[in-house]
């Protein structure tokens, strides 16, 4: 019997990917457009990875340059300023997901495990009036598979009573590493690897 649900955030609760794409374009606006486009491809194929990983990828893989950690943090903060300004708008909320969460948070223990920056994530959830639905809200720079492991350990959850809902391959891998059933949503490519694929939360029953 399922008692605990771990939620990804971007693409599952908030339709934020286009805004995050804009953020990467903005912080790298002075670089070669073809390289930025390659970064955006990487970003869209790896929705569950943090901005810290993507910034390092841009420098180390695409520019073939070393980047100091201080520069990574500087760019991540610049990115976060853009996100905090735009993503507090409720128009980006995925209505069917938020409706399901608001109607069921007292029946299950809900947690967010996201590739988004943890501080920014807590800020957004507070501004969007979502915080009350979740026992914990965790994000990067801690990798997602470790976030999942931490939630399981801190709450002494059993694997067969806990699932992870996400929209990316990284979400699936975090679930698999931690021996959890993965429920895919908002990404048809995940159907083959999902225990259950959620076409719409308006018809979803646990």
Image (spheres, rainbow, N blue to C red):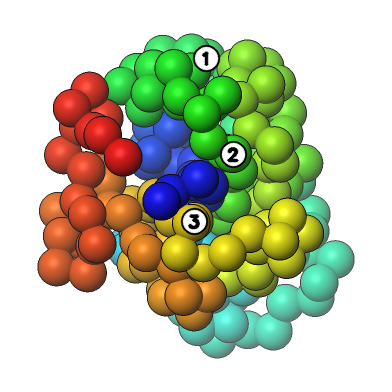
Give the residue at mark 3: 162
* Labelled disc at residue 109: 2
At mark 1, the secondary structure is: loop
Q: Is residue 84 visible?
A: no
Q: In which quarter of the image is residue 175?
A: bottom left
Q: Position of residue 155 (x, y in %)?
A: 73, 55
Quadrant housing the C terminus: top left
Picture layout, residue 99 above or below residue 25: above
Considering only order in the chain, which callout, 1 or 2, is on the residue closer to the N terminus?
1
Judging depth in this view, the residue of 4 and 126 nearest the camera is: 4
Considering only order in the chain, which callout, 2 or 3, is on the residue closer to the N terminus?
2
Left or right: 149 as drawn, with respect to 201: right
Q: Residue at x 26, y 34 (%)?
A: 205
Q: Where is residue 72 in the image (x, y as percent from the top left)?
A: 74, 64
Give the residue at mark 1: 89
Picture layout, residue 75 above or below residue 178: above
Q: Do the residues labelled 2 and 1 touch (CB within 8 Å)?
A: no
Return the residue found at the far right: 70
Task: Compute the Cα span from label 2 to label 1.
Answer: 26 Å
Q: Do the residues labelled 3 and 2 touch (CB within 8 Å)?
A: no
Q: Residue at x 45, y 42 (%)?
A: 10
Q: Where is residue 89 in the image (x, y as percent from the top left)?
A: 52, 14
Task: Compute the Cα span from label 1 to label 3.
Answer: 31 Å
Q: Which residue is drawn at 70% across and 37% down?
A: 135
Left or right: 40 as drawn, with respect to 58: left
Judging depth in this view, the residue of 155 and 72 nearest the camera is: 155
């Amino acid at each position: 019997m399922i008692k605990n649900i771990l939620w990804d955030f971007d693409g599952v609760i908030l339709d934020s990917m286009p805004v995050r794409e804009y953020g990467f374009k903005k912080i790298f606006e002075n670089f070669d457009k073809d390289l930025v486009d390659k970064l955006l491809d990487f970003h869209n194929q790896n929705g569950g990875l943090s901005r810290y990983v993507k910034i390092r990828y841009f420098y180390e893989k695409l520019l073939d340059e070393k980047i100091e950690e201080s520069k990574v943090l500087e760019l991540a903060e610049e990115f976060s300023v853009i996100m905090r300004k735009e993503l507090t708008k409720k128009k980006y909320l995925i209505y069917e997901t938020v409706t399901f969460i608001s109607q069921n948070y007292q029946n299950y223990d809900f947690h967010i495990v996201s590739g988004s920056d943890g501080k920014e994530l807590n800020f957004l959830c507070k501004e969007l009036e979502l915080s009350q639905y979740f026992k914990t809200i965790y994000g990067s720079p801690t990798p997602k598979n470790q976030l999942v492991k931490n939630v399981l350990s801190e709450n002494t959850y059993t694997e067969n009573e806990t699932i992870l809902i996400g929209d990316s391959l990284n979400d699936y891998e975090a679930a698999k590493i931690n021996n959890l059933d993965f429920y895919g949503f908002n990404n048809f490519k995940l159907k083959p690897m999902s225990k259950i694929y959620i076409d719409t939360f308006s018809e979803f029953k646990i």
